[in-house]
Amino acid sequence: MRICIAFFFSILICFVSGCTSQPTQPAEKPKSTIREVELAKDQHAKIITLYPAYIDYITKVQKKMKDTNVTDEDIQRIFDKTVRRELDRIQKEQDIFLDFKGFNDVFTATSYLSDLKKLTKRLMDEEKENMKSVHEALRKSADHLPGKDKIILMLPLSEEHRYAAKATSGLMGFAMSDGSMVIMLGEEYTHEILKYVIAHEYNHSVVNEHPEIRQPSSIDYLIFEGKAEVFAQVLYPKAPPIETEKIASSDKKKILEQVKNNSLSYEELSIGNEAKEIPRLTIYSLGTELMADFRQKKSEQTLQEFSLTPVSDVIHEGKFKSALE
């Protein structure tokens, strides 16, 4: 499959006045790369990596450190002028909006520069193989669940997010409402888990194309994540699933009561709420349990039919029917 690579850079345009031209500045090095790939006959994807922008950020911070004491504010300023500026440019150019559902600190500069530099260089060295894995996972996902064109941004995972990514084997993924995806790769990632996470987020991106099957609510959040997990597990059964803690039956009953009353937000189901006795990652543990059971009951369904099942059908025919109706 032919892969087109486009490099983005800024060029200072020289305006001519009379017979005199202003000297041009040398073109900046690329801050990101785009690979355009075909997924199906009428479906394509753009895979964008921002590793050069991160290297530029690290280099400028380290250079400043040699000359003077560097504050957190200095580091954030440099981050905003390098990585954040490139992210903003890509959002404008690709007509996407990066909404991280409360996790907006991905736009915050890391203080672990040596770790970030080491990881970014590794990702650049392994970029060819990673792109092969991403393309494979996108094509495999699109074969089972056709959708619109996709845009995938790939970034290094900062050390501050390493604990949050532990349950997902060193990766964090986000699917935006506009169909774009962000994948953040950490030290522990493998190609198999990368494919798994791509399939998971791809499922989200296509389900988001069908608002008519969703009913934004606590139960919808469980179903949304459960569908994506089951979809990814079917495509990549050897990849380790998200690590969640087992919930006792008595606790599960209390949680489902709150789900029925629509009193739990997406964030509470994801990161937990001690006051409401909601364990961390409940959205995945209960969501996967619900949708794995539904998939088994509806084994005649294709993955596309399964993924696009309306929320109301899952409630009426699913495992937690007695607790949710």
Image: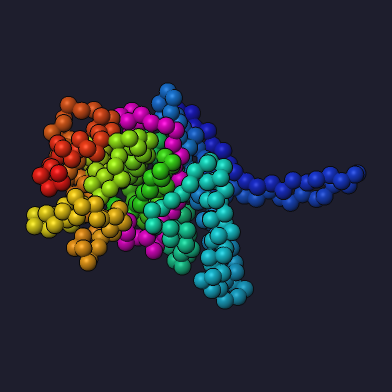
Magenta segment boundaries in residue numbering: 140-166
**Which residue in the rendered view is the most extreme toward the bottom?**
69
Q: In which quadrant of the rendered image does the N terminus lie?
A: top left
Q: Would residue 267 be found to the left or right of residue 129 on screen?
A: left
Occupied quadrant, residue 170: bottom left
Nearer to the camera, 205 or 166 = 205
| Horizontal and vertical percent position of residue 192 | 30, 43
Q: Residue at coordinates 47% horizontally, 54% vertically from top-left?
A: 121
x and y, in percent, of residue 257 in the image: 16, 53
- Residue 230 visible in image: yes
**Viewer can see residue 166:** no
Q: Residue at x 11, y 54 (%)?
A: 253
Q: Assign the C terminus to one quadrant of the image.
A: top left
Residue 319 rendering spot, x and y as whole percentages: 12, 42
Q: Residue at x 52, y 51 (%)?
A: 87
Q: In the picture shown, does residue 74 fall above or below 310?
A: below
In-front residue for pair 179/84: 179
- Image vertical order of residue 274 relative to residue 137, above or below: below
Is 316 situated left or right of 47 in this image?
left
